[in-house]
Image: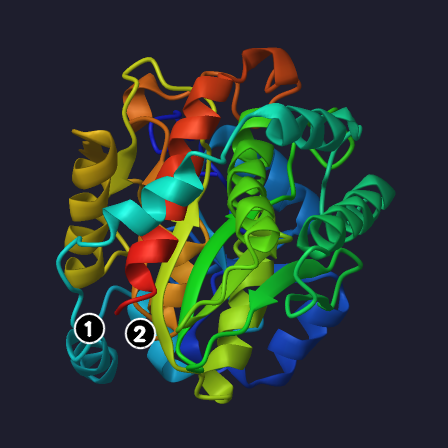
Amino acid sequence: MHLKSCIASALVSISVATAASLVDADFQARVTQGFRLIKTSPADAGAWVTDEDKIANYTGKCVHFVDITDIKDPEVLRVFNGQKDNSRVAAVAAITYPAVSHQTEANGLIAQLNTSGPQTWLKALSDFYNRYYKSSYGTQSATYLFNTVKSLSAPNPRITVSQFSHSYAQPSVIARIPGTSPNLIIVSAHFDSTGGSSTARGPGAVDNASGCVVIMEALRVLANANYAPRNTFEFHFYSGEEAGLLGSGDIFRSYKTANKPVLAVVNTDMAGYSPSGKISSYNDYSDAGLLAYVRRIITAYLGSYTTDTCGYGCSDHASAYSNGFPAAYVCDEPDKTSTPYIHSPNDAYSTVSFSTVLRHAKFTMAFLVEANYI
């Protein structure tokens, strides 16, 4: 969910929330009635909408929003209000991202990447009627993903695969390769999808089965190589992204509470449609040091890249960023030349370029190996 160029229709808010509503009885009553509080920009005070409104009138029309109903942390809210959080700035600035210098190690693993598995997994994911986070198909797709990731991880018994439960039925999935250090390097992608409404066909092939199979392929090769990292690697597959960054929001909220030492989060949302033939590195909700590091890695391993901004709360890296963790986002194209089939029944398997998927898998592997030495 990253397009910002769709034309937003006029939307009527059910109610405008004030800061006081975060703690008053009216807030709880609206939640009980099934409404959710969303923001579409830093200046937006918030609007109460139903789940179907979120998908049909916002996601389906490519209007970016963040569901802030469950966000109680004032530091996170300040970020989504467009204000600087000085504590997160200082913490992130303390991380030093080194020169790119591990090509021999990385290239040996990159040579083992291919598109055989990604084609199989992407076909299976896009064959679900949709992967809407509240549908039975969404829950079934989470089970498929969990079981497949466990199977890919099996060659290395040190890898753990778990489900992260949410207030809705579709869990997120996390695979973890433990390192000798607890410091975390995270690569991520969301796996839910929408076709423009809660009941529409939503294959979500490019958005974002493509991103999922990219990090699955990297995990497969690392598991088969019995790779033993210094930093701990995590592979995150988020649910509920299309509904306002719900899954990633829950996870990074819990990571902040637990004070987990996260050195980098690189999110991949859409990795299967690229007329330019280049990875696109986006500017917003990204930290300058990590963003520059990501671009050095792209240049060293793949050549030039494109850039763009994706807009308010455009994908799950915004959850990491708002919770104080260093974040960056890579995509297959700048916004204007990205897939025209997003959030529709036409985001189909047949539109996916697997050479693009492989390009992103190469970047992901290069990033993980290089980041192992942060």
Q: Quadrant of residue 164?
A: bottom right
> Considering only order in the chain, which callout, 2 or 1, is on the residue closer to the N terminus?
2
Element type where label 1 sits in the image: loop
Label 1 crowd bin: few (<14), some (14–19), many (20+), radius 10 Å? few
The disc placed on residue 84 is 1
Q: Which residue is drawn at 49% across and 72% down?
A: 252
Q: Can residue 139 be seen in this view?
A: yes
| In the image: residue 94, left or right of residue 141 | left
Kind of residue at disc 1: Lys
Q: Is mark 2 on a helix, strand or loop?
A: helix
In this picture, is 331 found above or below 205? below
The x, y position of residue 172, in whole percent, is 67, 59
- In the image, residue 331 lies at what x, y percent? 36, 35
Q: As rendered, which of 265 and 342 lies closer to the eye?
A: 265
Residue 74 placement: quadrant? bottom left
Q: Is 275 above or below relative to 365?
A: above
Q: What mark, if any, has residue 78 been given in the picture?
A: 2
